[in-house]
Amino acid sequence: TNLYNIYNIQISVILAGRDCLVAGDSCSSDENCSPRLRTLRQCVAGNGSMKLGPGARSQCANAVSALLSSPLHGCQCKRGMKKEKNCLSIYWSLHQSIIHGLNLVESYPYETVQRDYDYVRLASITADSDVGMTTVNRCLDAAKACNVDDLCQKLRTEYVSACIKLTAKSGLCNRPKCNRALRRFFDRVPADYTHELLFCPCTDTACAERRRQTIVPSCSYEGSEKPNCIMQMRICNADYVCRSRLAQFQYDCEPSKTSASGCKQGNYGACLLAYTGLIGSTITPNYVDNSTSSVAPWCSCSASGSQRDECDSFLGFFTDNICLSECRRRRRPAPRLYIPYMSFLYTIYCIYKEIRWMANTEQRSVWLTHEKNPTNSLCSHLWTIPILPLTPTP
């Protein structure tokens, strides 16, 4: 028995981090693993032991036990990968069986992503933005940095266009399309750009409002009325991607009163990445106003009845989470290096980019919409900051 347990531990270590799609293919081609995986999927489809009966439940338990020593145990997925939903369905078939008593949530669905901030490049882009200004607008700096990066600008333009466009039939935005574009942006653009946009520190309401508008909340976040958070959680858990993003967030941002960092996992970057992973989902979080830095999903706990405690716990993970608060407060800013004439050069560059952008017939209507609200313009800083003189200020 001891040798068998040691063997299982070794297998788990070796297979940790394996792509669940690869693990699923490996299991499907194995004559011993394949029938057990089919059994488990039938168990999950059976919606619990109450419907399956005692005999079927025993078969399900045996299938789970056998699969714990298969390539499926320890497999994970990559956020934003192709066939992400298929990969996550394989992960959850084993790790969260909905059969009572067989809850196997012992890890998290996504591989750990190590991303280093490109501070030098960000600094070169944002340097000197405070020359000749009484205050520094870090959110404005973040927008400028994104505009100079081709991928960031492209995907940001795509989601803004998708989120502000109104459908002819309803006169409302296409929220599913907006959310898909937002997910592409936050999944594919490096965190050194997305985190600067979303977590830039503000000391005035104008800056805070710009930060709040980052995800175009009128389409992606707000609604006529706030739904109940329990209902939103159920909708989220019925979708493999949303359920996985929430599980990752709850793991990476789990608070701890005994930890000096405030986070049980002690990884600020992972927590912020998990937070941005929720954007574009049923439980998209955002800043609740432009006077505080409080964040929450668009839902409430009113009329929760006997589930009020569960609802408050879920909402509190956003509104009263020391880990999330510390992550946002202690996030290392890009160092502000002095590079002469950077703002002037950036202004020339930005004018050139927007002239080319406006020349595109398909996007001209988007520009007109932006003109009505200059804060949404990709180069709106041209209207809010002065061009630097050609000689350095003494």
Image (cartoon, helix red, strand yellow):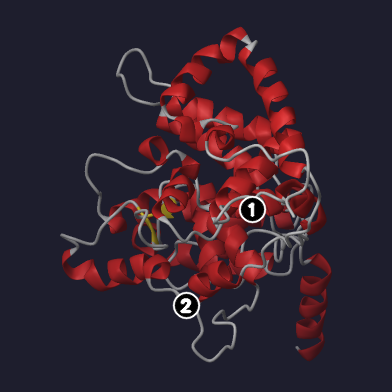
Quick one: label 1 or label 2, which is nearer the N terminus?
1
As measured in the structure, the alpha-carbon distance from the residue carrying label 1 to the one carrying label 2 is 31 Å
Q: Going by the image, does 301 lie left or right of 130? A: left
Check disc 2 and report its element: helix, strand or loop: helix
- Do labels 1 and 2 touch, CB within 8 Å? no
Q: 86 or 356: nearer the eye? A: 356
Residue position marked by numbered label 2 in the rendering = 322
Residue position marked by numbered label 1 in the rendering = 130
**Amino acid type of disc 2?**
Ile
From the top left corner, tell me how far across and down residue 329 is, in percent.
Answer: 54, 70
Q: 251 or 147: nearer the eye? A: 147
Using the image, tell me which numbered label, if any, was put on residue 147. none
Residue 347 location, quadrant: top right
The quarter of the image holding the N terminus is bottom right
Rendered residue at 34%/62% (across/down): 50
Rendered residue at 68%/36% (across/down): 147
Residue 78 visible, this orientation: no
Residue 369 visible, this orientation: yes
